Amino acid sequence: GSAAPQQGGIPTRPDQQTPPQGGADDFGGGLGQDPYGDSTATGETTATEDQSQGVVLINTTLTNGAAAGTGLVLDESGLVLTNYHVVEGSTQVQVTIATDGTTYTANVVGHDQEADIALLQLDGASGLAIVDLDDDGDPAVSDTVTAVGNAQGQGYLSASDGSVVALEQSITTQSSGSVLGENLAGLIETDAYVVGGYSGGALLDDLTLVVE
């Protein structure tokens, strides 16, 4: 869901450092698709420059380790939207612009734990490219979409094609360590193949616009 990063385009899906299904993982799941369910699409490729516009790689330091996820640049001064569970419990947040490799220290300037979204401000950022949002309304079931994210914290963006399976879905995530369980609603479910690290990333339509 994901404006929510990849739950529907903007963060909204738990990109949990430890997903409730599939075993422990230090990298968040995808937004907009169902990172906790079964994926039927498997076409994962390296994201193109167009798919990477305004998308960032997030790496966090925790008291007991590290984690990674994805985020979306909302304005040129470095305001970034991601899932709250991507940065929850972090002591330091580093954000890298996917298209040019520039890295910034980031501060969490706002969050809504219940909605699983957080806003980050990149220190000293200016003139950044932002994501293009599709403001025409929700996608329809069977629409083609592409999930973009920092798969397994690999340090570059992957893209995974799929289609919308259902709208207005809800999930309950399990608590793990410092990350609390959540009840999330209004999510877009897709069959795009996603793994940990996609949380907070973009869900794009066939025009490479972020689905809201």
Image (cartoon, grey):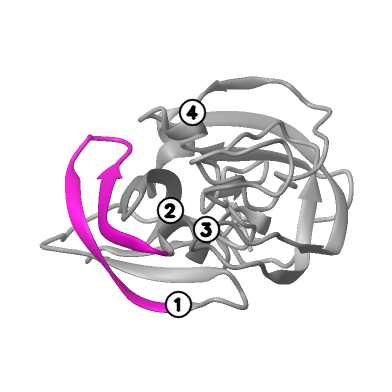
Badge 4 amino acid? Ala
Residue designated by label 2 = 71
Residue 178: x percent and y percent? 48, 63
* Circle 2 residues within 10 Å: few <14, some 14–19, many ≥20: many
Q: How many marks?
A: 4
For the residues labelled 1 and 2, the Cα–Cα distance comes to: 14 Å
Can residue 121 be seen here? The reply is yes
Q: Which mark is residue 47?
A: 4
Badge 1 amino acid? His
For the residues labelled 2 and 3, the Cα–Cα distance comes to: 22 Å
Residue designated by label 1 = 111
Is 146 above or below relative to 113?
above
For the residues labelled 3 and 1, the Cα–Cα distance comes to: 19 Å
The mark that comes first in sequence, 1 or 2, is 2
Magenta span has 92?
yes
Is 138 above or below relative to 45?
below
Q: Which of the pair 111/123 is nearer the observer?
A: 111
Image depth: mark 3 or mark 1 in front: 3
Is 176 above or below relative to 57?
below
Magenta span has 66?
no
The reply to whether dot 1 and dot 2 touch (C-beta < 8 Å) is no
For the residues labelled 3 and 4, the Cα–Cα distance comes to: 32 Å
The reply to whether dot 4 and dot 1 touch (C-beta < 8 Å) is no
Magenta extent: 89-111
Image depth: mark 3 or mark 4 in front: 3
Residue designated by label 3 = 177
Say which element carries label 2. strand
Seen at 76% across and 34% down, the residue is 162
